[in-house]
Structure formats: structure tokens, C-alpha cells
Amino acid sequence: MQGPWYRRSSRSGSGEAMTLCAVAYVRVSTVAQTEGYSLDVQTADLTRYCQQKGWTLKRLFVEPGSSAKTSQRPVFGEMLEYCRKHRDGIDVVLVHKIDRFMRDTYYHTQTRNLLAGYGIVLRSATEPISEDPSGKALEGMLSVFAQFDNDVRSGRTVAGMKAAVEAGRWCWKPPRGYVRGETASMDHDPDLAPVVRQLFDDCASGTFPVSALVDRAKARGLDIHKQVLNRMLRNPLYIGVVRVDKWGIETTGDFEPLVHPETFWRAQAVLDGRGPGAGKPYQPARAEFPLKGLVRCVHGVPLTASWAKKSYRYYQSQPRCQECQGCRVSVRAEALEASFVDLLKKLQPEPELVRIFKEEVLNVWKQAQKQASDEQARLTWRLNGIQKKKDRLVEAHVHEQTIDAKTFRDHMDRLREQEATAKLERYGAELEDLDVGAVLAFAERTLCDLAGSWNRAEPPQKTRLQALLFPSGVTWDGEAVRTQETASVFGWIDPICDDKERVVTPTRFELVLPA
């Protein structure tokens, strides 16, 4: 290969070597080193080396706090671009040591060949590399040792990180809602932690799809994309579980959970399409048309709603309802809503019947609590057994190394599936910690004044109350609002008062009566 000395001599037209021109590259691996002496020492040594050789130092490139494992370094790339553009005026790239240039043999060889294509050679101020066979051999060995040293360091770093993760520390960037901790690896972010917690509650309720949760997050100051939010809601770190699948590690974190485990698993069920409200479209309630979506024409098609002349509210039949084209249902909202209030008054039960019903529900609730407590204890025992199996599996794979990675993953996946199923079953068996007396007192007030409760409610509460009272909607027959199906509670009250023995144990919040 024709080196810079040959090129310079040919360009000068004589056999005498001309003064060589060099660029120097200095690098340290961490920002902390930039505050010490390493950069200054390298710069001084390279400047002195050029003076001793009689070379002209054209430019010095300084890369603070960057790894040499790859060529993806900003200043290093800038140096290569400078050499390309000024190839006719640069003869040498000078480094303090070979490991400052590159710590990977493949990238070292590729970059060396790139410089050689520009007619530029690589030199070290502290190592005798050259273009002769022995110099090239030494350069190759130094490159190999640089990579070997880097691989050893990386192995020690990974081993240290594994030990830290096994101890429950999170070694990477904290997820949203957490910040770096002083004693624990993470602490709650005082600004975002309440927002994240509320998002999990909203998701677990089954009321909002992920797209609506994104809007609610942005309204609370958390700008997040749908895909990122979905990953966040799946992250077990929020319940204090550190999981690193590539190392086969799952353990309890050294930080405080941000979300209650039951809320987290309830949210997973909703995201998987198994929870309450999963797949239901989210539609904000409209205050001016509270019965839209509930009232239907006699043919079962929901009435639409609109303003006439910007002053009058109307409920109307939809164009797709072919049967209604002849009669063209169109009713003033005030008349239809007044008829709906009349229907509520007719359905309103006697206060004494509601009081007896409340007492019976309290008795049934106490029985259900005992059954739920027994089932919770059984499932907790089952979950403890699964956790012990996971611990033994980790011990066998990580410490004893008696099973291979594939076997470990297969067994761990099965145990995680069993754990998720057991947690969902435990959630399904759990009766929420409610003040049932207060809930029933509220229900009593509502049932004894259905029309007044509906009139006083806000639009979202009206929608929920309507859905509860009339699960199949109501019908406008041209004269009044009517219904063929009402909430089960209206069918429970009279039988309970006639024969209290007919009440059976509720399944969660629904009373189930014999046919």
C-alpha cells in the first residue's frame, strides 16, 4: 500500500520526505474522567509527540464521556468526516493508545481500512505500531487486547447488575411516576405518581378504553402516546416487582409499589378483554339530551336528538328506521323527559319495603364476606406455593445452573400463567372493602325518590342510573315512555318482603333469586 510518505514525496517531486500533517483524537469513557487529568494528559502527550516528530498538528478532536465499543461517537464521526474532506492535507491520525481509538476488533479493522483508503495511517503516541509486518502485528494484538479488556469489564458490569437486580434494585431509567431514590433504587415522583395511580384506577374500572385514558393523562399533565401508555399499564414495576426476562430474574423491588396489586391485575384483565366494561365504547354524556341512547322507537331503534332553530330540543327517529318513515317520530325533549320522570315515579317502591330489603341485603353481605374470606385464604396459600416454585426455579437456573435457559423460560412462563390466573380468581372472589351500610343508605334514598335523584344528578350519573334501572332501554310509543324490563332490584323487593327465606347469597354485588 502507498503510505503518506510515498504520497508526499511524489507530490513534492523529490525523494525527500516532507513534514507530515496529523489530526489527534483523545477520548475518555466517563464524564467523571473529563473533570480529572485524563484529557489534559492525553492532549499534552500528543502535542509533545508531534513536536518531537516534527509533525504539524492540524486539529485536535476531544470526545468526553464516550465508549469506544462502537464507532457511534459524535466527535469520532466528525474526525472521520474531517479526514475525508481534507484527505490531501492529512497524513496521520494520532491517538494516545489504541484502546482510545477503538475497543472492538471488527470496528478497528473497518475504520483502519477506511483511513487507509484516504491515504492516512494510524499512529499511537505510546505504542510502536507502524506499517511494517511487526508493527501491523503489534497493532492487531493491541486491538484484540483492547476488546478483551472491554469484554471483561462488560462481564463484570453485567454480573454486578444481576446481583443488584436480585437484591431488588432497578438499575435502569425509572418509569413514569418514579424518580431515582437516595436509599431505595426509586422513589415516588411527587408530581406524576398520583397521575399514574389514577390512570391504573381508570383502566381497572373498565370504563375507559386506552385512547380515552391518553386524553385523561394529557389533561392531568402527562403527555403520553397510546403505545407507551399501554406498555406502562403492563409494567409490573408499579406493583413493586422487578422482572428481567433476559436474565431469568423476578423478585420484589426495594422500592414502594405505586399501584395496589389488585388494581394492577384488574387492569390487566381489562386490557386482555376479560374485565368489566372491556370492549365497550366510551361515549361522553350530553347534558342537553340525557335520554339519547336510552329511548327507542316502537321498532326498537334508538332515537337520535338534535336542536331545532337553536332553541328547541327534539328526540327523533333515525333515517335508517324504515318502519318509522311513515310516522316520522319527532317529540319535544321536554315532553319525553317529563313522561320519563312519570315512569320513575310509578316504579318508586314503598319506603317500608325498601327498609326490609336493606336489612336482608346486610345479612346476605355478612354471609358472603365469610365465604369470600375463606376463598381468599385458599388462593393466597396457592399463590405462596407458586412463588416458592418460582424461587426454586430461579435458584436452579441462576445459582446452581442445573437447568438450561429454555427449560427455565418454559417453566417460568407456565408458573406466571398460573400466578396470573390465581390472582384473577382471588380478585373474582374478593368482596370490596365497602361501607355496605352507607351504600345501602344511599340506595334507599335513591329508590325512595327516583325522579328527584334523576333530576338532581349530573349527566354522567344520569347515564349510569338509567342503564341500571332500564338495562334494555325504554320505548316511546307516541304517547308515553314505557318499558318491558326494569332493574332486578324491583323484582327482588316484593318477594323478600313476602318471604325472606327466598334470598340467597349474592354473587359479588348481584342478588340471585331462585326461579
Image (cartoon, rainbow, N blue to C red):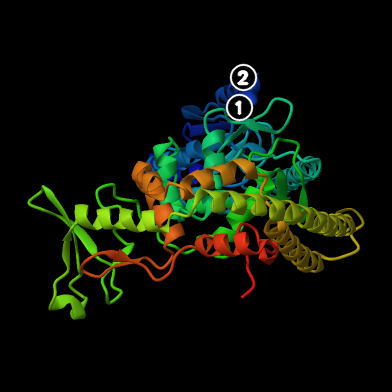
Say which quadrant the C terminus sits in: bottom right
Name the residue type under label 2.
Answer: Glu
Q: How many circles with numbers are drawn on the protein?
A: 2
Kindly tell me whether residue 132 is visible in this rendering: no
Residue shown at 49% from the left, 33% from the top? 23
Q: Residue 35, labelled with which disc?
A: 2
Q: Residues within 10 Å of mark 1 (few under 14, many from 20)?
A: few
Q: Nearer the viewer, residue 482 or 156?
A: 482
Kindly tell me whether residue 279 is visible in this rendering: yes
Q: Judge left or right: residue 317 versus residue 187.
A: left
Calculate the distance from the C-alpha at mark 2 to the C-alpha at mark 1.
Answer: 7 Å
Q: Judge left or right: residue 427 versus residue 218.
A: right
Q: Residues within 10 Å of mark 2 (few under 14, many from 20)?
A: few
Q: Which residue is mark 1?
A: 31
Q: Judge left or right: residue 383 versus residue 515.
A: right
Residue 33 percent across, percent down from the top left: 65, 25
Q: Nearer the viewer, residue 158 or 186?
A: 186
Name the residue type under label 1.
Answer: Val
The answer to whether the residues at label 2 and label 1 have Cβ atoms under 8 Å apart is yes
* Residue 465 vertical position relative to residue 488 in the rendered view, above or below: above
Residue 149 percent across, percent down from the top left: 75, 43
* Residue 420 vertical position relative to residue 242 in the rendered view, above or below: below
Single out the residue that lies furthest toward the bottom. 323
Residue 291 percent across, percent down from the top left: 30, 57
Secondary structure under badge 1?
A: helix
Q: Residue 510, labelled with which disc?
A: none
Secondary structure under badge 2?
A: loop
